[in-house]
Image (cartoon, grey):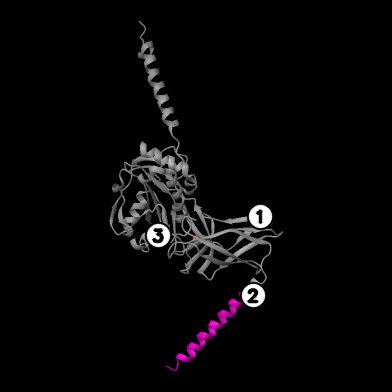
Amino acid sequence: MMRRGWWRSPLRAVAVCAVLGCGLLAYAHLGARYGYIGTPLKVRLAPRLQLTDDRGKPFDLSALRGRAALVYFGYTHCPDICPTTLAALAPVFQALGPDRGNAVIVFVTLDPERDTPALLHAYVSAFEPMPIGLTGPAAAIGAAAKDWGVSWRPAEGGAYIDHASVITLVDPQGRWRVRYGLSQVADPAAVARDIRHVMKS
Amino acid sequence: MNLAGPRRLRCLLKGAVVASGLATAGVAHAAPLTDVGVSDGWMRALPGLPAAGYLTLHNAGSSPATLIGATSASCGSLSLHRTSRLHVMSHRSGLAPGSMAAAPGMTTMQPVAAIEIKPASSVRLMPGGYHLMCDQPAARVMPGATVPVTLHFSGGGSVDTMLPVRGPRGS
Ligand SMILES: [Cu+2]
């Protein structure tokens, strides 16, 4: 007697194909559903960010649950790339329209020695919308930068810092979602679309 | 007490030498580089912090022009800088697997000795690239003000320009 494998059963074959087909369709659908202007990150809970804010109060990233956060590591004596990147977020917030109240910018200093809460406060006050400035002990800043994948080092000469200039988008559930360089934030409408997308899903 | 007099005199003399040096530099302004034009200049001011200056240089001449420095009475020092990417890969990127993008490299800012503008072409000093770096800006460097800048070129020529000061949003 010839043995018939389970795959030889027409009914089962149809069932298997249906499952595979649906899976493929679902995959294709999900893949095509949304394309970020930024670089998608593996979705996972954002690393801890427990520092001191620009008003001298303790800060914990979890306090921002329910809002999207755009987290940037830099330093106030950075005259070119840091203010250029922060300023590029102003038109993004304009494009967010009524959703702008549900998003916040966080500026973490990599230069805690010079960037006291008072100096940070004067710095962030110059931007619109005003970021939350964060500082803290050098060890805590170093650990945060490492956890957040932001490489940095003191530049030759000492006054400046070489650093990855990237904005990490954290969703209202406190998860890493998307990362942006300066060239990617140059399209404010697209970044606003990304932020609205992570606000909803 | 007796020493104070000569010391003060020497100080004054030194000041006079510096002043005459500046006057000589001023004479150089009388022979400006007519082939080099400046447009779209501005400076970004942040309270008490280094300021970055941006502008576009046009060389209408038939030979290259080389910017080698800049001075301003409104800056403790003014230097040529360039922001650029360091292509260093990081393994702590957190990027989604299969992502085509490299881990974020570091951005660095370095002094630049010279910026060449080829004949009949332009070079932009702009955010994220070449810029003038104004360290210890004077208190008057604030949005709404104008900063006088002298651009120095190899061969001794110079070009004077005025940079309107804007806030961090560039407006
Ligand atoms: Cu610079």
Amino acid type, callout 3: Tyr
Q: Which residue is mark 2?
A: B27
Residue found at the far top of this picture? A1
Is the CB–ligand 1 distance for label 2 below 8 Å? no
Please state the horizontal and vertical placement of residue A186, each as a whole percent of the image: 49, 47
Neighbourhood count class around disc 2 (C-alpha, 10 Å): few under 14, some 14–19, many 20 upward:
few
Q: Chain of mark 1?
A: B
- Rendered view: B154 above or below A46: below
Residue beneath the point at 51% across and 87% down: B10
On the image, the x and y values in percent for residue A115 come to 37, 62
Residue pointed to by mark 3? A123
Q: Which mark is on residue B121?
A: 1
**Range of residues picked out in magenta:** B1-25
| Position in image of residue B132 (x %, y %) | 54, 62
**Residue depicted at x 45% and y 31%:** A32
Magenta residue check for B2: yes
Q: In whole angstroms, how far apart are the C-alphas of marks 2 and 3?
A: 39 Å
Q: Nearer the viewer, mark 1 or mark 3?
A: 3
Q: Main secondary structure of the magenta part?
A: helix
Q: Under tag 2, what secondary structure?
A: helix
For this rendering, which residue is in front, B89 or A96? A96
Q: Are marks 1 and 2 on the same chain?
A: yes
Question: Of helix, strand and loop, which one carries label 3?
Answer: helix
In the displayed orientation, state which residue is furthest to the left: A58
- Locate residue A42: give its quadrant: top left
Q: Residues within 10 Å of mark 3 (few under 14, many from 20)?
A: many
